[in-house]
Each structure stands twice: as C-alpha cells, then as structure tokens.
Image (cartoon, rainbow, N blue to C red):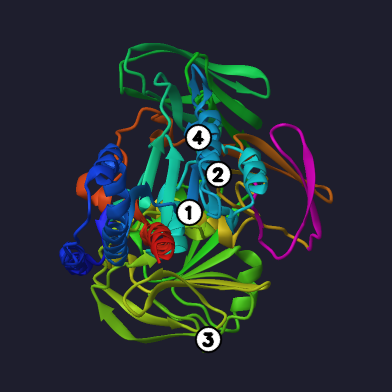
Amino acid sequence: MTWLNPAAFAFLAAIPVILLLHSLRYRRRDVQVSTLFLWEQVMREAHGSLGLRRLIQNLPLILQILLALLLTLAMANPALTKAVKRSKDIVLVLDVSASMQTQTPQGTRFDLAKQQALDVLQALPSGRQMAVIAAGRQPQVVTFYTDEKVLLRQLISQIQVTDAPGNMREAVLLALSFTQGRLTQEVVMIGDGAYRHLADLELPRSQMRHIQIAGGKDNVGIVRLAFRKVVETEPRYEVLIAVKNFSPEPRDVPLQLTLRGDRVLERQLQLEPGEETVIVTEIAGRLRGVAHAEILVDDAFALDNHAYGVIAAQTQTWVLLVGQSNFFLEQLLTSIPGVQVNVAPDVSADALPELLEANHLMIFNGVQPPPLQRGRYLLIHTTPQDPRLQADGVVQQPKVIDWARQHPLLQFVNLTDLQIEESLALHPRDGVQSLIDSDGISLMSVIDEPSLRVVTLGFDLMRSDLPLRVAFPVLINNLLRWLHPEGGGAVAGQVQAGTPYPLFFETSVAQVAVQDPQGAEKTYEVQGNPWLFPDAQHVGVYIFRYGESKRYLTVNLLDAAESDIAPANALPTFAPSGDEASRQAIGVVQTPLWPYLLLMAMVAGFGEWLIWCRDW
C-alpha cells in the first residue's frame, strides 16, 4: 500500500480535541429529598444496566473519533500497488531458411517454430497488435500490425519453409524499423540460431526475445558441385564435388553421380567429424543433360544430400580486346571454354559496325571507344562518349563502401577490402546504374538498354588486386553471361536457392511456361529483357519453355553454413535480467482506496447524526 498524501495525517490532531470536548461535564446540583427508600430501588436497577448505558452514552464519541480517523485516511489518499507485466505489441520474425527443415524427434524444426509462433500469438494480450516477418533469403512482411488473432493464426499457419539460406540480419533490421525504439513494442525471433552476420549488430536487449528451436545434429552434405569442359579435341568434362561431414561422429558416405539416369561416378567416402573431401575427376564422352549428385546417407537434414547441374552444348563467344595489353584478363578469357579472343590496338567509328557483326563482345581497356549506339561493351579505366556517365578527374586509393550484391554482374562476388591504387571519379546520371560505390563516386556503372549494354569499370585492373582474388573469374563469367547470354550456358543456368535468375531472350517474348522440380507448371508474363525469374525457391531442376526454345535452371543449396545444423549459439536469449528486467518489463498498477474510506466516513457521520436527533 502507498500513501500518496501523507501530509494529511496532521488532521489526526482533531481526535484529542474531540476527547477534550467530551470530558467537559455539567456541574451537579444538590437536591434535598424526604426519604432514600425509593432511590435505593432505582440505584439497584441502574447498576444492572450500567455497561450498556455507558456504551450508549459514549457511542457519539466513538463515532466522532471514527469519523475524524476515516476522513484523515481518505485525505492521505492510500492506494494498493500491484506489479504487473507490461504488455507490448509484437513483431514476430519467423526463420524460414533451409536449416529449419532439420528433422527432430517431435517433427521438423519449422513445425516446432510455427507452434511456438502460435503460442506467442495466443499469449498476446487483448488490445495488443502483432506484425509477422518471414526471414528467408530476403525478408518478407507477411502482415503489418493487426490485432485480428484469427487472421494472424491463418497467416502464420500458411507460411512455408524454403530451400534457401536465411538472412536473419536483414529481417531483424526490418523488424526494428517497425518498433522505432518504442518500449511498448517487442521483437520476437523464432529460429534455430543458424544466423550469419548478426553478431556484430548492437541489438537492444529490452526489445528482443529469442526463442531457439533445437533438435537434430547429424548431417553430411554436398557443399560444392561444378562441371567444366576440358579444352581438348576429345570431349572430356571435369567434375568437382565437395562433401562435408557436419556430424560429431565419423560417417561412411556413399556418393554417386548420374547423368540422364545413367551412373557415371561412384565413390565410397569416409569422413571424420568436420572433414570436407573434394573430388575432382574427368569423365570422357559427349555428355549432355541433367546431372544429379547424391549421397546415400540417412541424416537429420536431407536437403543437402542432393545437388544438380546441367551439361549443355556450348556455342562460340567471340571477344574483341581493344587497347592496352592485360595479361590476367587475356589468360582468363582464353581459359574459358567456348570463348575466342581477338586483339586490336584501336577501333575507329567507321570500323565499329563491321566489328560488331564479327564479335559478340568488345572490351576497351584504357582507350576511349567511339560513340556507342548499339552492341555490348566492357570499358576498363575509360568512359563512353555519353553525357550520362562522365569522369570528374581521378581519385587516389578509393575504398569500396557497398556493391549491388543481387545484380547478375556481382552475384557471388566478394569485394571486401578491395585494394585500388587509382580510379576515375565516375558520376552516373539518370539512365545509368552504379553497381560499386565509393565515397561520393561510382567505381562500376552500367547502361542497360534494349540495343545497348555498357559496363564501365573506373579503375585499371593492373593497378588493383582484383585479378589476384577469387572474385575476378567470377566477375568475368558474370560479365560474359550478362553481356552475351546467347553464349555458353544459354540453355542452362545454375543458382543458389532463393536467388532471382535473369533470363535473357534473343527475340521478343511475352510469356514463359516454367516447370518446377515437383512437376507443377506455371505461366509468367515477361516484362523486360532480361526477365528476372523470382521463384527459384526449391532445390531441383526448373524447365523454361517459350516458343520453340527450352532452357534449364538447376537450383541447389550448396551452403556450408546452412548445412551446419548445429551452429554456435551466437544469440542465446536477448532477455533482460535483474533490475533491468524489473524496470523495463514490469509496470505498476495503483488502486485508490479513498472513495471507500469516504463512504465509511459518511456512514459514521450519519449514525452520529441519528443519535443526536434522538437525544434532542
């Protein structure tokens, strides 16, 4: 109990005043009588009722003291205090990444996570709201704040797990943008803890709650699969398969590779805990079709036991390298199957149309090209004669701040700590997209039009460490695919699950029929060239049909971090403790008592008034 106005207790001084007033008596008067005989009888009767009479005579005093006491207590404003848990709006972040398909004795992790989500919804106080975010490769807002529990229960039940790696970092940042730092809102994360790029975030623990889903620990997975045609007269293909044991115990792993149903490779692997084995072998023959790598093991995470690839016939891609010699670039281009390289010191405006007919791609290295109206170009350390992209001098040792990781040119390209000695200060305008950003300038920009595609790299490759990085061959392969999609790999592609896939068309296409790995077919309206296919969510082979053309897309997980189903617990609870929890998660409710005390005082006053009226 709390006294909100303790100064009112000073009015208790009225009680002694009441007692003093009642102690004052009238002075008795002596009266002479003729006999005491009759008075003796009266005195005996009075003695029998003396206690009740004294009580009746003192009842006004008791009521007046009680009235003063009750009024004083009412003015002191007492209140009953009760500590209660503060209710909050909730942003629910549900992990839908591939590792949530891990089997546990109670079902999959995702089934358990959805049940936890429904329990959180059930405990949501009346009048509070909930928003739901699915944390897949890209976070998806399932619903914004709503208090309709029936709708929320339906939406949570409809969420499906994906075959893609998760991106809990972006999902958490999105959820925190919903709360905007308000203590009346809380982010509840439900997942298995296999989160990357989250440990460096400074998350407010008072607004975070993590419910970790455990269970399942044994897993062996395929983490890499690649095919490469060996440049020889006799058709031969090089196959690379990497298998890793994520289990705490040694495992015997049978591995097989089939091509169009025929077994072309079979191995028996013995893997220690944490061991990764890379198999590189050659297969002779004119191979073509869908290849399926499979490990025949029984573990808790079956998704990474399969990987797919397509071996397709390649066409010739002719590249004209104009300007300064570049050893790294020339060696890389000539090592790519199907790529033929020509070299020229310079190209005039008159010769450009004829060269465009003979070459699929032109690379200008350190020399400015003539005006470009159509074609596909890579410009290195130079700029096009286009007012939309000009260089304002040079910048010494620029640092890469960010790059467009989802763009087809930069997929799987890591530019962290890229060292550049000098770069042109590119300033793209409307119609030009910057792909690699530095401090106030662009290091790489693109012009993407129906008849013209220009990629401009602002720095000289020989004055950077890019040719020495793994990212260099990946970037050049992406450039070839984006600038000349009709070349090698045009009839087949490969992406990680959850990654949008750019599909290039040689002619105008209005619709594409897509058959997914389960055999279901769906027709998509095509807008633009390339068209970005957004639904590569499941591991397997997708088939695209349009007109007389047919293309394949293989989708794999191939992610060691996602296959590690027993990750380090980098995000234990996020629950505040001790005084912080009391201060932030607990509220106080006060119930005032003065109305009840005032009512009792009125009853006491009314009773004293009735006695006074009777004696009057």
Q: Secondary structure at mark 1?
A: loop
* Residue with the mark numbered 2: 495
Q: CA distance from mark 2 to mark 3?
A: 34 Å
Q: CA distance from mark 4 to mark 1?
A: 35 Å
- Identify residue for label 4: 116
Task: Write down the region rendered in magenta.
Answer: 508-535
N-terminal of the pair, mark 4 or mark 1, is 4
Whichever of labels 4 and 2 marks the residue nearer the N terminus, that label is: 4
Above or below for 366 versus 32 = below
Circle 3 residue: 386
Q: For this rendering, which residue is in front, 259 or 80?
A: 80
The alpha-carbon separation of the residues under discs 4 and 2 comes to 32 Å
Calculate the distance from the C-alpha at mark 1 to the C-alpha at mark 2.
Answer: 9 Å
Question: As shown in the figure, which amino acid type bears the numbered disc 2?
Answer: Val
Mark 1 and mark 2 lie on one chain; the one further toward the N terminus is 1
Give the amino acid at mark 1. Answer: Gln
- Contact? badges 1 and 2 (CB < 8 Å): yes
Q: Nearer the viewer, residue 544 or 615?
A: 615
Labels 4 & 2 near each other (Cβ < 8 A): no
SS state under label 3: loop
Name the residue tied to disc 1. Answer: 411
Proximity of marks 1 and 3: CB atoms separated by less than 8 Å = no
Precedes in sequence: disc 1 or disc 3:
3
